[in-house]
Image: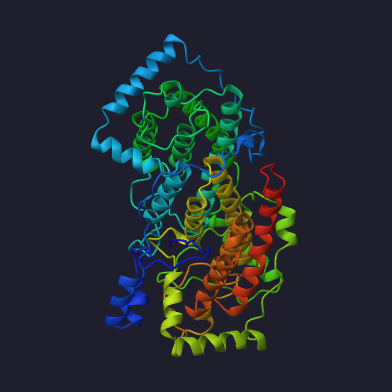
Amino acid sequence: MPFDTEGGILKSKKLLKMKKISVLYIQFFVLVLVSTLINACQKTAETTELEAYLPTNLDETGGSWKPFLVTSGTDITVASPTATTSAEYQAELAAVKTAANGATAEQKAAIKYWSAGAVIRWNEIARDLAAQYNIPPKNNPDGTYPAPDANNPLAYPRFPFANPPYASRAFALLSVAQYDALIATWKYKMQYKRSAPYKVDATLTPSVPKSELPSYPSEDAVVAAASRELLKLLFPGEAPLLESKATEHKNSRIWAGANVQSDIDAGEALGKAVAAKVIAYAKADNMSKANAQADVPKLRDDATKRGITTQWTSRDLPARPPMLPFFGNVKTWNFDSATKVAIRPTAPPAVGSADFNKALDELRAIAKNRSREQFRIASFWADGPGTYTPPGHWNRFATELIYKYKYSEIRAARTLALMNTAVEDAGVVCWDVKYYYLLPRPTEADPSVTTSTGIPNFPAFTSGHSTFSAAGATVLSYIFPNESAALNAYAKEASESRIYGCIHYRFDCEIGLTHGKKVGDYAVNRGKADGSGL
């Protein structure tokens, strides 16, 4: 989904490939239409061809920007480097020249891949993993469902099940680690001002654009180490792959003639130290309690006491345990739990009320006479099993804009940290609302209402797509104001896609958009006060 040079978003001719199509989807549509859509609606993460660029701004003050979890840019200590005139440095420089001059075709391909942007590439890797792991387990013969086991992540069903809430949290943790680590990196770069190897020795011709940034510590090594550690936590079965990617990433800077080994080593240590702080946060953010199925009866009893007697139930056969019923208790990034309650929407129309029946009648009409355009929109935004989910959709939009506007690594990380934390916060507040009101899905209210993309295994009100998308669009519109009209149009389309798919009532979507924008505004306020000048 590339962005054009006029500032608008173009829809990709090759959409991200869906790896799994629901049984209901196949039963409902004729073979010809299904075939057309498989070709037109591709939804897997893919490696994109990108060229290296010089940032439009080096953001020299980045070391003083406000981090999320690290106290300040000086919270992690980085020792001063050896002088470029020292024997130790000269030996490193000689090794770099040898490596750069003898780079193989495979190494040159790695240089090209990684030089498109460290933050961009590691978010691409995260999206790909989210898509690969977004597969709900099948039921056992006795009608129960197996649960993924973090201690045995490659056994069936693989851990994690990277559903939308899980994906939103993964992208947020990754981006916070990258951003906080790069703030410290920029602080020490400007403090020590060690020149890049090609500045020290003019006979060295790097195979990447020559940056004016100091080279110590290496920002690429920092991002590689921080990303590797966070993604190992989140996708433990992929540790060998992640170690290999990080090693290649770091080595690519030496093969390119852009860093000496001590630049890389300092970056590795710094990225790993910051990642440890983010991992400690992750272990205490309540995610471990988000799937507490034993507490669901109490959740339902509490809703009954509030007068909610008609409650959502799973439409899967056999009935599947509800998806992450307590994700609404996960710690938010940009506001506190009291604010979460304060901005919680009021109750939706009661089942059977005039307003409820009006919304249901609209879906009955769509289900009977869904237009090709409505079907296209519903399919484009489905983001179901086998995809990187709505949070991944917005993550990709952000990385495309970062590339278009040629952001520095630290500003790229800031963009994604603000947006991805807002999107996770949107997931938290949305899941809080879903399991607070437990509103049945349209297909439960009227089984004759057929969906176009399957039935999600959680309550209807509010729409996750709407809440995620409004939060993402709000933050990205603040950072990229020239793109605001297109981004908000995309959020609206994502929201309406759930109506066209007959997955949500209109009020689910409209209130979700409003709720998501409020969430996004909190991230924008953080951004305005972080010292970045934007």
Vertical order, 299 against 133 (above or below): below
Q: Position of residue 424 (x, y in %)?
A: 58, 54
Quarter placement of the N terminus: bottom left
> What is the quadrant of residue 292 in the picture?
bottom right
| Left or right of 285 in this view: 94 | left
Q: Tell me if I can see residue 297 in this picture.
A: no
The location of residue 176, given as percent across then percent down, is 57, 43
Percent coordinates x, y for residue 56 in the rendering: 54, 45
Can see residue 15?
Answer: yes
Residue 407 place in picture, x, y as percent: 53, 46
Residue shown at the point (60%, 74%) measured from the top left: 508
Q: Nearer the viewer, residue 340 or 195?
A: 195
Relative to 267, say whether 91 is above or below: above
345 with respect to 461 (left or right): right
Q: Quadrant of residue 151?
A: top left
Front-most of 171 and 416?
416
Q: Residue furthest top?
A: 87
The colour mode here is rainbow
The residue depicted at 40 percent of the width and 47 percent of the height is 125
Asked which quadrant contains residue 464, the reply is bottom right
Question: In screen coordinates, is 76 left or right of 264?
Answer: right
Most distant residue in the front direction? 202
**Residue at image point 58% right, 26% down:** 188
364 w.r.t. 251: above or below: below
The residue at the point 48 percent across, 30 percent down is: 218
Name the residue nearer the viewer: 264 or 404: 404
Q: How many marks?
A: 0
